[in-house]
Image (cartoon, grey):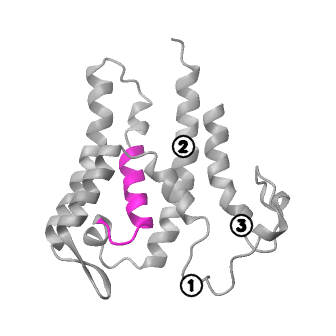
Amino acid sequence: MRYITKVLLVLCYPLTKLPGRSHHEHGSLRAVHKHERFATPGTSSTTSPGIGTYADTLAALVPAEVLSVHALVISATTEMTDNGTVITDMSTLRLAFWGFIIVSVGFYIVPRWFGGRWDKLDIARVLIPPLAFVGWTMLQRTTAFDAAFPSVTNTQRTVVALFLAAVLAGGTAMLAYRADQKPK
């Protein structure tokens, strides 16, 4: 039950940052002080209030090895310019994106399968790490997602990733609750 509360807190906290809304209007778990309700003037085009929380939620569902190797691959396939980070090896980064998805699945399946703990709900649980990886790369800028899907706009990827994060967090909480209910 603590896990469900934590997931809900992580997902509802950004809602408290919307201008002119009270915590009651959003069902938030945290009261908001008057001075916290509004973004700093002039920063609305440079900041994304609450998006970092969703990116953190998704990152928590991805194996750490995948995230760390992704960072190394990004450093090998991009370069910094005056205009920002530019992908220099699109095909390698595209292959790496699909490789990260396969590895995310493998990191879940191998210990469950060979440990003799595989159950029918693992069919749904196995989708969590790769979907979380896709969502996380969608919320970040200059990632393997850019190489795999170069025509997706920033707005499209952000909106889809936010919905994906909410669905994954809810689904993960439900699956965790089901796992807690199993007799030991």
Give the structural element (helix, strand or loop) at label 2. helix
Circle 3 residues within 10 Å: few <14, some 14–19, many ≥20: some
Circle 1 residues within 10 Å: few <14, some 14–19, many ≥20: few
Q: Are marks 2 and 3 in contact (CB under 8 Å)?
A: no
Circle 2 residues within 10 Å: few <14, some 14–19, many ≥20: some
Q: Are marks 1 and 2 in contact (CB under 8 Å)?
A: no
Q: Amino acid at mark 1?
A: Ser
Between circles 2 and 3, the one closer to the viewer is 3
Residue at 57% x, 38% y: name it. 173
Answer with the quarter of the image where residue 183 lies.
top right
The x and y percentages for residue 115 are 30, 19
Give the structural element (helix, strand or loop) at label 3. helix
Q: CA distance from mark 1 to mark 3?
A: 16 Å
Magenta run includes residue 119: no
Answer with the quarter of the image where residue 112 lies.
top left
Q: Are marks 1 and 3 in contact (CB under 8 Å)?
A: no
The x and y percentages for residue 64 are 35, 44
Q: Along the polypeptide, which appears first: circle 1 or circle 2?
A: 1
Residue at 66% x, 46% y: name it. 8
Q: Is 129 situated left or right of 178 in this image? A: left
Give the structural element (helix, strand or loop) at label 1. loop
Q: Along the polypeptide, which appears first: circle 1 or circle 3?
A: 3
Above or below 108: residue 60: below
Q: Which residue is mark 1?
A: 45
Above or below 112: residue 87: below
Residue at 81% x, 74% y: name it. 20
Q: Along the polypeptide, which appears first: circle 2 or circle 3?
A: 3
Q: Amino acid at mark 2?
A: Gly
> Which mark, by number, is residue 17?
3
Q: Which residues are magenta?
A: 128-143
Q: Amino acid at mark 3?
A: Lys
Q: Which residue is mark 2?
A: 171
